[in-house]
Amino acid sequence: MRPGKKILILGVIIGFIICASRIIFLWWEFSSVYQQEVVTLDPWVRKHWNHVKILTDTLNYMQSTKTILLWTTFFGDPNFVPSYSKLGCLFPKCFVTSNRSHLNQSDALIFHLRDINLKDMPTYRTPHQVWILLHHESPHHTPLDLLKQLDGLFNWTATYRSDSEISLSPTLKKKDKEDTHIDNFVHNKKKMVAWLVSNCKTPSNREGYVLELKKTVPIDIYGSCGTYNCLPKMSDECYDTLNKAYRFYLSFENSICKDYVTEKFFRILSTDMVPVVLGGANYSNIAPPNSYIDALTFKTPRDLGRFLLQVAKDEKKYKSYFAWRKTHRLVSEHYVCQICKKLHQPKIKHSTYLNISNWWFHDANCYFWSHNSKGHA
């Protein structure tokens, strides 16, 4: 081999070694930057690598699959959330399991309040793990002693409260295109008011309100608190039967507390009955415009009864309570879908409920209905 060619090959090898060592050095530098603050790179690299790091972190975070662990059961059911693919979530990057062997790899843990056992809490928690408290019930049906012992544990709550990170209520969406057709919602209905109820003595004293309301307008009470039966209980068939006969339905909550509203109210909105509500929620924030009648806006039950009789006689007025269906719709998103979406946000809120019992009970401002004025519960 000619000496010139040998020198050329040797130069190529040396150049390759130099380049490789430089690449390895930069890789080591950049790897340390990825793990900690930049302290050794020159200003130009520092400036541009920070941008690259932000983009890289965001992409990696958005593309990773998040694991959601159901730590407790839900009234005894360990697999109370269907498989993630069946929830209809728009974000397809989460894995839901009740297998506790995934604890250390889980991004979020869900605890159903009613099923929490303080002797069965996780013994280890990763620094960025989100703990979520799931609760559907009002403060009146919340175990106070248990909640007091949960201060400082939870990052998010999934409740009916508007200040929870995860909402259990449907959301109101405006339709992209207004519907021009609206059905005849009267359908020759002959009866006035229906109420399906099984809890006969409640913190809200709704039964006392109904007792007064019955003096002005006829009310048929179904269930264990009344004289009528609607079978199967709480079924679509039952509500369909009521829907064909009645103009109004009493969506009276068992508790009058901040934001408290149950799924029954939203279920009635899908029928051809006008819901008459009694509760602590700001219904104008959660329900379609002019879709309900709020009992607490009337001075007395008699005034409400007279108003219902007037609306029943005025077909145009009655139909106006369904006009919202032309422009709006209610959208239900499973709370696990909401959790998954939040977990995929580049910056996750990691605040902690330091005094969750005070937030839940004191801030609820619960009261009960009485003849003269509202009483504090």
Image: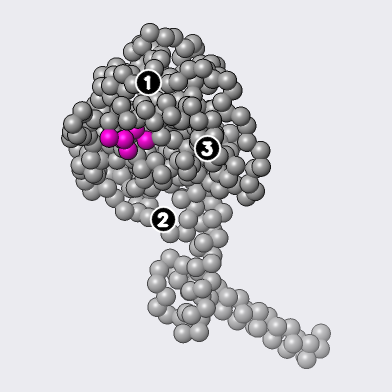
Question: Dot 1: within a 10 Å radius of its alpha carbon, few (fewer than 14), some, or many (20 or more) residues?
Answer: some
Residue 225 in sight: yes
Side (left or right) of 245 relative to 143: right
Q: Which of marks 2 and 1 is in front?
A: 1
Q: Which of the labelled discs sits on residue 217, or is there none? A: 1
Q: Distance between the residues labelled 2 and 1?
A: 52 Å
- Please provide the residue range marked out in magenta: 294-299
Would residue 295 be counted in the magenta stretch? yes
Mark 3 is on which residue type?
Ser
Q: Residue 316 carries which label?
A: none
Q: How far apart are marks 2 and 3 (CA)?
A: 43 Å
Q: Residues within 10 Å of mark 2 (few under 14, many from 20)?
A: few
Quarter of the view holding residue 203: top left
- 134 and 101: which is toward the camera: 134
Per the image, the residue denoted by label 3 is: 320
Report the number of discs.
3
Indicate the amino acid at tag 1. Answer: Val
Is 348 rendered above or below residue 289?
below
Q: Which type of secondary structure does the marked residue at label 2 adopt?
A: loop
Label 3 SS: helix
